[in-house]
Amino acid sequence: MEGDTRALSATGHDALMEDVGRPPDGCVPMAAVSWVDKVQKSNGGGLPVPERVIDDEFIASRMRVEFPNGEDGEPVVTIDPEVVDAMNGLWKLCMVVKVLGRHVSIAALSRKLRELWKPRGGMYVLDLPRQFFVVRFDVEEDYLAAVTGGPWRLFGSVLMGQAWSPEFNPLKDEISKTPVWTSLWARVLRSKYKIGDIHDSAWMTPKGTWSALWRSVNVGLREVVNRGIGWVLGDGKIIRFWQDRWLLSTPLLEWVSDQLPVEERGQRVADYWIEGVGWDMERIAVFLPEFMRQRLLAVVIGGCYGVEDKMSWVGTENGRFTVSSAYLIQSVDEISKQCMSRFFDRVWRVMVPERARIFLWLVGNQVVLTNAERVRRHMADSDVCPLCKGASESLIHVLRDCPAMMGIWMRVVPVMEQRRFFETSLLEWMYGNLKERSDSERRSWPTLFALTVWWGWKWRCGYVFGEDSRCRDRVKFLKSAVAEVEAAHLAANGDAREDVLVERMIAWRKPAEGWVTMNTDGASHGNPGQATAGGVIRDEHGSWLVGFALNIGVCSAPLAELWGVYYGLVVAWERGWRRVRLEVDSALVVGFLQSGIGDSHPLAFLVRLCHGFISKDWIVRITHVYREANRLADGLANYAFTLPFGFLLLDSCPEHVSSILLEDVMGTSFPRHVRL
C-alpha cells in the first residue's frame, strides 16, 4: 500500500491502531502495548498477523528457495498461491470508512463505531492516509450488518463505507457509497414540508403554503417517481406484500384471483414468511394463481443479518434510476405502438456518410417532403409523381416503387428475394435491409442499400430542380461509392465490423491436488419461466463427489444461475471442502460474485447470500468458463426439469448424465470459435 510509513519505538504510544475488541467475560485485562509490538507479535489487540494465524510448517511446506545462477547468484523465492490466499483471507471481513467533512482521531472513531454498530465480537481499527480507516471484524454477522446497513452518521456527519479490496489506494481513491439522502438540503426539505414515510401519501397532498417550485417537484413525485418505485427484498418488514412492486414490476394486488380482505391489504412480506419453513402458502394460495405462486417460490427472506428492504427502480434491469427509463414509464399507454428504438439503432450503425444517416432518420420519421406529403400539408395541389406521372409520389414510391428506382433495385437485389423486397411496408422494408449480414458475400448490403436510397432521392431532387446529371451506369456508380465508403472507413478506424474468431478446443479441466472443482448452471424456459439449477463437485481425478438438482419454480435465467451457485456453496461448505474452484458459464453471474452488486438490483438478495458463504473461512476461486466446459452442470439443470419442486442431493452420478462425466474424465474437448 502506497503512502507514508510511520514507525514508533517499542515504548511509543499506540497512535495508529486502536483495538476496540472485547475480550471474553472473565479474562484478565490486557496490558497496553505499542503499535510496533502489535505488528511484531500477536496479542489481543490490533489485526492478527499472518505469522500467528498460519504456522511455520504451513509456510515452509509451500515455499521454495532456488539459486538458478549458482550459490553466488541471487536467490529466487517461490511462494505457493495458497499462502497468499490464506493471508488475504485475514482481510475478508474488512471495510474502509471515512467521516465526510470531519477530521477525527482513531480513538474517538473507535468508541463511536462500537456505540453505533454494537458488534458481538472483536472489532479493530487501523488508520490510513487522508482520514480513511480500515475496520476489521471477527464475526461475519457484524461485518455484513456494517457493510450492507446504513446510512450511518457519526459526529453530526455522514459515515461513508465500503468493503475493503486490495486495489483500494487511500492516496487517490474515494469511497463510492455516499448516502445522498442524509445530506443537509434533503434534511431541510423533509423538515419544511413534513415529508413522511414512502408508504404515507398524505404529505403529497398539495397545500396552499407550498411554493410553485415545490408544487412542481411534488407533481413529478406523484406522477413519475411513484410509478417507478420498486423494492428489493431484505428482511421483509417494510415492503407491503400486496401493494408494493417487489416480486414483479406490478403489485401482486393486480394478480389476485378473488376479493382480497381489507385486513390483508396492509400486510408486510415478513407476515407471510415462516422461519424455517418458507412462504405461508395456505394463506397465499387462496388469492394468487399457480403461476404467481411459482414465481414466489424462487424468492426467500433472510440469510443476511441486519439487511433491510431497499427501494429500487422498476424501469431498469439494475434497479437504478435513469431519466430515459422515467420518460418511458411516463409515456406508456394502453395503445400498442411500434418500437422504433431498434429501427434507429440500425440507422445509426450503418456504414455510410453522416448526411446519408440523417436522410434515413428523416425517412424513419416519414417527414421527407414528397408531393404526397406536400398535399397533406396543403403546400401543393397535386401529389402525382413527376417522373412516372402514373402514381402518387409517396415516400415508398420515391424510394422503391417508381420505375426510375425499380430498375436499379431489380439489378442489385437477388431474384429469390425480390418478391419480399417489393411487398413489405416502408418501415419493415427499411428495418430488414439495414440489418448486418453475417455471410461475407453480402456484408456490404446495408451500405449499398442506404446509399441507393440516399442517391435515389438526390437524383430525383436534381430532376425536379433541373440539375439532372447524366450517369451512364448508376448501379456501377453505387457499387463504386460503396467501395469508396468502406475504404475510407477502413483507413480511419480499421475494420471495426470484423470479429477475429479463432477455433479453440474447450474441455473441462481437473483441479489441482487438494482442491475440488464445483460446476453450477441454471436454466429458465421463457426467461422468466419454469427454472431449474444443477451442480456437481469433483476431485483432482475428475471423480464424482456430490451433485445436486434443483427445481426452483418460475424465475429469470440469472436468478436460476445464482440459485445454483448458492446451493453449490452450501453443499461444499457442509461437506467440509475448504479449497473450492467455482466454475460458472454466465459472465454476468461471475461479475456479480467478483465485483458485487448494488443494493437496488433485483438480484441483490441472492448475491448477498452467496457473498455470505464466500466470505467464510475458506478459499473460493470464481472462474468463468465456456459452456463446453460446463456440460455436466448443464445436464443436471436440464435433468431437474423432470423432478418435482425442491432440492435433490445426488451422492452418485445419474445415468442421464453419466456419459458427460466420463467424457470430462477422459479430457474430451469440443471446438468453439472465440474472439481474440
Image (tube, rainbow, N blue to C red):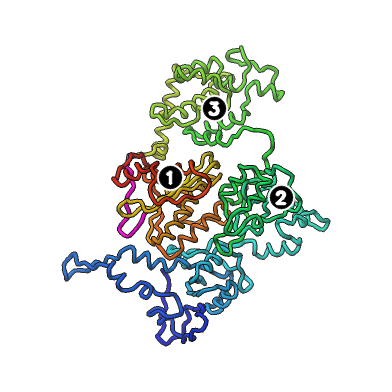
Q: Which residue type does callout 3 highlight?
A: Met
Q: Is residue 341 left or right of residue 284?
A: left
Q: Earlier in the sequence, mark 3 or mark 1?
A: 3
Q: Are marks 3 and 1 in contact (CB under 8 Å)?
A: no
Mark 3 packing: few (<14 Cα in 10 Å), some, or many (20+)? many
Q: Nearer the viewer, mark 3 or mark 1?
A: 1
Please state the extent of the stretch shown in magenta in the rendering: 502-519
The residue carrying mark 3 is: 430
Q: Earlier in the sequence, mark 3 or mark 2?
A: 2
Q: Is residue 213 visible?
A: yes
The residue carrying mark 1 is: 636
Front one among 453 and 26: 26
Q: Which structural element holds mark 1?
A: helix
* Residue 517 lies within the magenta run: yes
In the rendered image, residue 567, in percent from the top left (x then y), is placed at 47, 54
Mark 1 packing: few (<14 Cα in 10 Å), some, or many (20+)? many
In the rendered image, residue 162, in percent from the top left (x then y), is placed at 52, 64
